[in-house]
Amino acid sequence: MEPPNTDSHILAVLELLAEDSPPSRFDSLLVRARREGLPDAELGRLSRAVQLARALPERPGRRRQWEDDLTALVDTARDLMDAPDVDALLRTVARRARRLLSLDIAFVVLTDLDGEIRGHAAEGSVTDLSTNVDLVSEGSVGARVLRTKSPAWTADCLLDHSFVTSKGLDEATQAEGLRALLAVPLRVGDSAVGVLYGAQRAVRHFTPDEIGAMIQFADLAALAVDNARLLQHARHQSTELEQDNYRVRAGLVRLQELTDAYGRIMSLPLVGANLATIVSAAGAALDGRARLFDPAGRLLASSEGEDEGADGFGGAGVGSARSGSGPGRGGVAGARGTVAEAILDAHARRTTVRTPGGVWVAPVIAGAENLGYLVLDPETPLVGADERLLQLAAQVCAVQLLIQGSAGITESPQRDELLDELVSAPPRAPRRIAQRARQLGVDLDEPYVVVVMRPEGGDHGRATVWSLSYVHRITGLKTEHGGCMVLLLPGTDASAAARAVAGELSPLLGRPVSCGAAGPGRGVLEVRRVFQEAVRCLDAVTALDAPGATAAPQDLGFLGVLLSDDRDVRGFVDSTIGPILRHDEEHFTEFAVTLEAYFAAKSSPTGAAGALHVHPNTVSRRLERITALLGPDWQNPGPLLEIQLALRLHRVRDVLRR
């Protein structure tokens, strides 16, 4: 029998390997070789051959595992790259992270440079706490991972007291029933842009390979997130550039249209076009309703063919209480006030003004002369070039008005010069001045009053614009004298005229307007005297510290007698106790005497009765009749003083007549 040799046993190993035999067959082969007395050297060679044979089947398995891992990595990279935005990308990261380590739940938090959460997503959660709580607050494991850019993990967060969590993370782990927790940073270069969490609802000891795989995946995810952010920013910039490009193109088209409109409107006066054509061209170019008004608020032309001279918006625009068409298409009364203020501002600032309602007002001026205003109610908001076109249209309207020689163009300076001449010095040629006034539509032989007004706190520019419109509307004169506006207005009631002026102008200026008024007067020679009385009344308002008040001599009682040049004592007596005197004369009563006795007795009916030698009841009945004649307030301090003064003046006049 041949002794056993290694070759036969090695051949047996190859046969077992070819048959894909289980490991126990290889063990049996070694046991048989020892039993057969194989030398130690040969037995060692056989053991090595068995060891190598056992290792051969593991290599294809490792290759298959490597191929599977490579396929998973490619799929993961594809999913990350295919995400349409950052939010979708975060959801993909959470889903892939959960699948990578067979986790129960995975959630990712994205932060900015200040640590503020800018995005989050979760996969496998049964509540919304993992996405609605702060997982990276100061002192938490998430904040530590962000700061150190290193992973942190625990097999059981409930028992591991060294694993510090935040309040938000505690709420999430309790709500989800989590035990094992792994947190790795999302790193881009030297910065951490977020934290990727993986968690298990049972105790789990994460192996170094698992932690390393999670770190590598987080790095890949961080790179994808950074790329997605850059792509999103690039898309946003691209969209903005497209919008800017569109706006630029639209602006160029609009600029070309406006340039063409400039040329057309500028050429209209040269080809003999009238105001209606110019205003219509402006309205068409600016896509709105355009209307031209004179300083008095009368409609001169409209882009919609309204009748010239109609009492349109303009009158109301500068304070008139009359009805009109109103601004824009609505004709809303509230908007009329805002446009009225815009008219004053436009002329005071000599530029276009926009109201809160979108209506534009452009002053029509020639030098310092106010020729009116152009009102535009556009369909779309105006931009810078549109505003310049509106100003140009207003200037072209001014040129056309000068070419046409409109009646109101030269009237304003003439009105100022005429009234300034009348109030500054006694007139040297009354007839010539009266004729000049009649040419302006003012008849000084008819009754007139003078109002001197002063806006408290300044704003004289807007007051001047309003005054020009006001005197145009009611056919008066205006000028500026001593820092105040002076108005000569037709009428006989100076007090009512002052109240009307202050009532219109004060709301427009948004500040009180003090007025002094006097009159009526007649003739050229009376103007300066009436003006001086009005100035003294305004001085009285100032001295009495009553800003915003109006006063005429008849409003000031006995002060009016002192301030008036004609010292109208009879008028004062008649306005104060006239009803008493007339009743005594018509009915042979003694009410005036009773009043004198009553005052002499220090307002005592009994004392007055003793002085008059009548019964006290008689005095009481007379006082009741006096109250019916003078009104219930006659015993108030103010009226009482004037009544006593009027009684004394009446008594002195009677004595002088005798």
Image: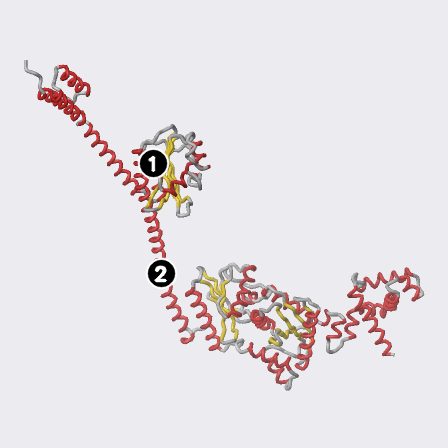
Near-viewer residue (248 or 55): 55
The answer to which image quadrant residue 63 occupies is top left
Residue drawn at (43%, 36%) of the image: 165
Identity of the amino acid at label 2? Val
Secondary structure at badge 1 equals helix
Q: Is residue 352 left or right of residue 94?
A: right
Label ID, residue 131: none
Give the residue furthest to the front: 40
**The N terminus, quarter of image:** top left
Mark 1–mark 2 distance (CA, rounded to whole Å): 45 Å
Name the residue that disc number 2 marks: 248
Residue drawn at (49%, 69%) of the image: 351
Identity of the amino acid at label 1? Arg
Near-viewer residue (231 or 365): 231
Residue 264, x across and y down, in percent: 39, 70
Q: Are marks 1 and 2 in contact (CB under 8 Å)?
A: no
Q: Which mark is nearer the camera, 1 or 2?
A: 1
Residue 84, x across and y down, in percent: 32, 44
Name the residue that disc number 1 marks: 95
Give the residue furthest to the left: 1
Residue 29, x across and y down, in percent: 15, 18
The reply to whether residue 4 is visible in this rendering is: yes
Q: Is residue 493 left or right of residue 236?
A: right
Secondary structure at badge 2 equals helix
Q: Is residue 294 left or right of residue 115?
A: right
